[in-house]
Image: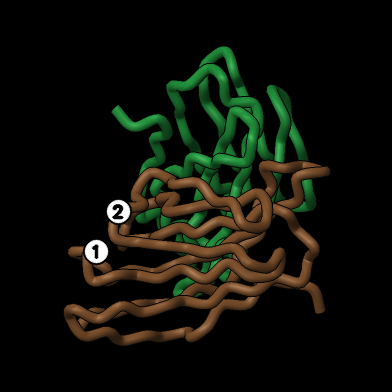
Chain colours: A green, B brown
Amino acid sequence: QKEVEQDPGPLSVPEGAIVSLNCTYSNSAFQYFMWYRQYSRKGPELLMYTYSSGNKEDGRFTAQVDKSSKYISLFIRDSQPSDSATYLCAMSAGGGKLIFGQGTELSVKP
Amino acid sequence: DGGITQSPKYLFRKEGQNVTLSCEQNLNHDAMYWYRQDPGQGLRLIYYSQIVNDFQKGDIAEGYSVSREKKESFPLTVTSAQKNPTAFYLCASSSLDYNADTQYFGPGTRLTVL
């Protein structure tokens, strides 16, 4: 079993939809949780960073961490075609070593 | 502009050749990392370095080598011992003083073995 599991999709939604992206993990030592967005043939860019459990909101994006269930989510409200990309979750127990999910490919149709 | 640069963007290698991928950062970050990404897969850690002249193996170090002679630079050599080197290679860096687990990525190098 992988330490981090992420549904690879692809996920296709109409413009304006609410998107929910999810990852589960098995290592209870993970304390730091990140979401990266990666456009085709580009490097990942950091979207959200969360420490421990709770919610964090930044514009149309909301990150949720539920450590009791070992489950993290990224919500995108009012999705736009420019949100079409691969979304990678990543997490760490500290010390800078990140474990990545395999990424979910999202397509937002106009 | 502060950031991470990688070169070249595309690289072609014949079997049996060693090739070196460049990674430079001007963010004054202490830590630097090399990842490999294959289609439909997440990122896998090859090597990382938290200080000049020191580096650690990641999960898939076999067939790769690195050096860290300067804080700003962390080149990766893909040796002929790497049996399946065709992949997208990503370099990242992070501060060790603040949010050490927040890594920033370069644009990547796509390596193809002919």
Label 1's element?
loop
Q: Which mark is residue B62?
A: 2
Percent coordinates x, y for residue B26 in the rendering: 76, 71
Pointer 1 residue = B82
| CB within 8 Å, label 1 to label 2 | yes
Looking at the image, which residue is at 58% across and 25% down?
Answer: A30
Percent coordinates x, y for residue B10 in the rendering: 41, 85
Looking at the image, which residue is at 49% across and 37% down?
Answer: A22
Q: Are marks 1 and 2 on the same chain?
A: yes
Residue A11 visible within the image: yes
Cα separation between marks 1 and 2: 7 Å
Label 2's element?
loop
Placement of the N terminus of chain A among the 4 image quadrants: top left
Task: Tell me the amino acid under the disc marked 1.
Answer: Gln
Residue A110 visible within the image: no
Percent coordinates x, y for residue A6 in the rendering: 41, 40
